[in-house]
Image (cartoon, grey):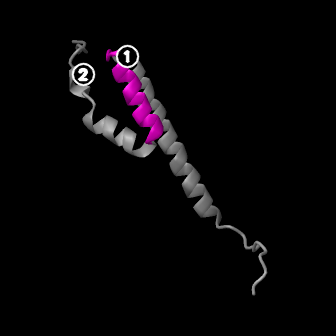
Amino acid sequence: MAPLVASHEPLDPSAIYSGSLLSLIILILDLIAVVQVLNSDRSVLSKLLWCLLIFFFPIFGILIYFLFADHERRRLRYVAIP
């Protein structure tokens, strides 16, 4: 029977770096989405639901937000400067 000792093989630094870089990108995108939601003119309940979706499902929540949120309605309120 093999001993139950942890191996002391060095970890691949590129694997650790790539995972943390991806996590940082997801965190930044989530924060951008939450700030956009909170600054929008949606109802309080709608803001709360979008923030909870992004918080509990960071990757899928942000994809759903950027794909299905009503961005066109909010974009129409901006007037181009001549």
The three-letter amino acid code for the residue at tag 2 is: Arg
Q: Residues within 10 Å of mark 2 (few under 14, many from 20)?
A: few
> Which residue appears at 60% of the width and 56% of the height?
17
**Image point (42%, 35%), residue name:** 54
From the image, tell me which residue sits under label 1: 44
Within 10 Å of disc 1 (Cα), the crowding (few <14, some 14-19, many 20+) is few
Q: Quadrant of the N terminus?
A: bottom right
Residue identifier under label 2: 75
Left or right of 38: which side holds 16? right
The boundaries of the magenta stretch are 41-57
Looking at the image, which is closer to me, 2 or 50?
2
Q: Nearer the viewer, residue 50 or 73?
A: 50
Q: Is residue 2 above or below residue 44?
A: below
Q: Residue at x 54, y 44 (%)?
A: 24
Which of the 4 image quarters holds residue 58?
top left
Left or right of 8 on screen, residue 52? left
